[in-house]
Image (spheres, helix red, strand yellow):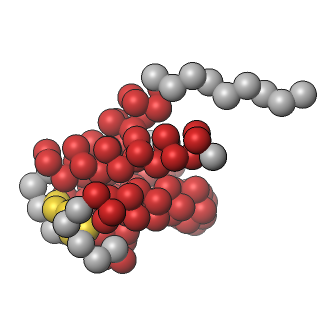
Amino acid sequence: MAGFLIRLAISAFGLWVAAKIVPGMAFDGTGTLVVAAFLLGFANAFVRPLLILLTLPATVLTLGLFIFVINGLLFWAVGSFVDGFRVGGFWSAFFGAIVYSLISWLLASLLPRRRESK
């Protein structure tokens, strides 16, 4: 449970940084960031793999760059579902998703690895 909360805090911090850096993104408070981080994690875990599978031809034709579009669209969708978390348009979502991913990846890489259960 503690690992989940730490990863949720990392995601919320990534959203905060993205909202501060990328024009067109804004949030109302910490609770909004936590809810948006949770929904973004849910979308990345369940919706993203399905979208990647459905758009596989486009992803192959663009040498994988279409995945950035998918990430931006998921980011934009979460912004439209969460009251108080605003994403101004596709390009704000696109660059916000890149900043969010980089910050989350960097901070998550600093966490100790989970032990495998035997």
Residue visible at 32% across and 44% down in the picture: 14
Which is more toward the observer, 35 or 72? 35
Residue 87 x %, y %: 21, 66
Q: Residue at x 51, y 26 (%)?
A: 111
Q: Is residue 64 above or below residue 56?
A: above
Which one is in front, 63 or 33?
33
Q: Which residue extends farthest right? A: 118
- The residue at 37%/68% (across/down) is 78
Q: Position of residue 90 (x, y in %)?
A: 23, 65
Residue 23 in sight in this render: yes
> Residue 26, relative to residue 4: is it above or below?
below
Quadrant of the rendered image containing residue 52: bottom right
Q: Residue at x 60, y 62 (%)?
A: 46
Name of the residue lying farthest toward the left: 23
Camera-side residue: 19 or 95? 19
**Label total for image:** 0
Quadrant of the image occupied by residue 36: bottom left
Is residue 43 rendered to the left or right of residue 17? right
Residue 61 visible, this orientation: no
Q: Quadrant of the C terminus?
A: top right
Left or right of 90? Residue 114 is right
| Residue 84, percent from left and from top | 24, 72
